[in-house]
Amino acid sequence: MDVLLHETAFCPYDALRQFAERHNAKKAHCGALASFCGIAKRTRTMERGKNIELQSLLLDCYPAMAKICMRDIIEEAQERWQLDATTIQHRIGAIPFGETIVLVAVLSERRNHAFEACRYITDMVKVRPPLWKCEHDTEGKKRWLTTTEQDLRRAEKWSETKIIDPQQNARKNTQRRE
Amino acid sequence: MKILYFAWFGEKIGKRQEEIETNSSIDNVDKLIELLRKKGTQYEEVFAEASLVKVAVNKRIADRQKKLAPQDEVAFFPPITGG
């Protein structure tokens, strides 16, 4: 599993190609690569009836803990699905709008395992690693964002889904690492 | 003890990291918060709303009853808004 924090811009397509090449060469049986790429979105906010244009986004981070947390999320995904390789790559610091914030990619023999694991990891990465978003507007004001209920609900929903045969998943995942 | 502050906690307190001399009576997170609150109004403001104060001890999310040792790394931060 690889977990990376990028302090400068990274190209998700290059990262994805490198990830696929790194793992696919020795794991030719993989039938699926699912990925999610999150992009810094320019949102408009209304303040006192006025449209506020946002200038930039800052993502504060506790890097050592974020990496541990992302590895925990990958381990949980490996318990739920049969995965050959997984990567979470997250941008931190100042992020211009339109640039990639996060890349999640999963290689698996089966596409439903790849799709679902990618979605699980993405939902968890939205709410668990210690990252804080701060927006700067064109008037120079800054605003720390609060957690969205929608993100929390999405992450919580996974606790309701049953883990199908974790022993078999663990066995297959171990075999593949060998 | 190494104390870290993230997001607006760090801005409010004016630093992201500090070393605190503790004695054996500061043996859990709750007692550490009480000690820090006495350091000034900026600390008082950060710790005022308990539901907004999240804690990690040695890089793992912890609650206020979590036991502490002098070599621990304790981080305080507002609710996570990542991703």
Image (spheres, helix red, strand yellow):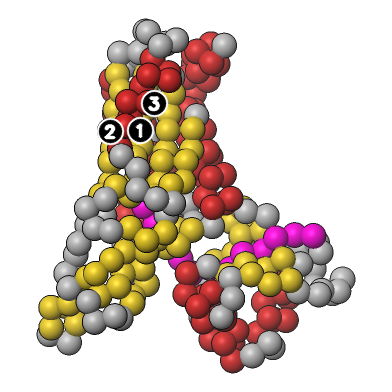
Dot 1 surroundings within 10 Å: few (below 14), some, or many (20 or more)? some
Horizontal and vertical percent position of residue B53: 53, 72
Asked whether the beta carbons under mark 2 and mark 1 sit within 8 Å of each other, the answer is yes
Is disc 3 in the same subunit as disc 2? yes
Horizontal and vertical percent position of residue B3: 67, 68
The residue sitting at the top extreme is: A29
At label 2, the amino acid type is: Tyr
**Residue at x-position 81% and y-position 75%:** B21
Q: Is residue A114 left or right of residue B22?
A: left
Asked whether the beta carbons under mark 1 and mark 3 sit within 8 Å of each other, the answer is yes
Is disc 2 in the same subunit as disc 1? yes
In space, the residues marked 3 and 2 are separated at their CA atoms by 10 Å
Q: Nearer the viewer, residue B71 or A111?
A: B71
At label 3, the amino acid type is: Phe
**Quick check: A119 above or below B24?**
above
The residue sitting at the bottom extreme is: B41
Dot 2 surroundings within 10 Å: few (below 14), some, or many (20 or more)? few
* Dot 2: chain letter: A
Residue occupied by mark 1: A15
Residue occupied by mark 2: A13
**Quick check: A35 above or below B2?**
above
Q: Secondary structure at mark 3?
A: helix
Q: Work out whether mark 3 precedes mark 2 in sequence or the reverse, and give the earlier one.
A: 2
Is disc 1 in the same subunit as disc 3? yes
Residue A15, by quadrant, is top left
Most common secondary structure along the magenta stretch: loop
User: What stretch of residues is rendered in magenta?
Assistant: B71-83
* Dot 3: chain letter: A
In space, the residues marked 2 and 1 are separated at their CA atoms by 5 Å
At label 1, the amino acid type is: Ala
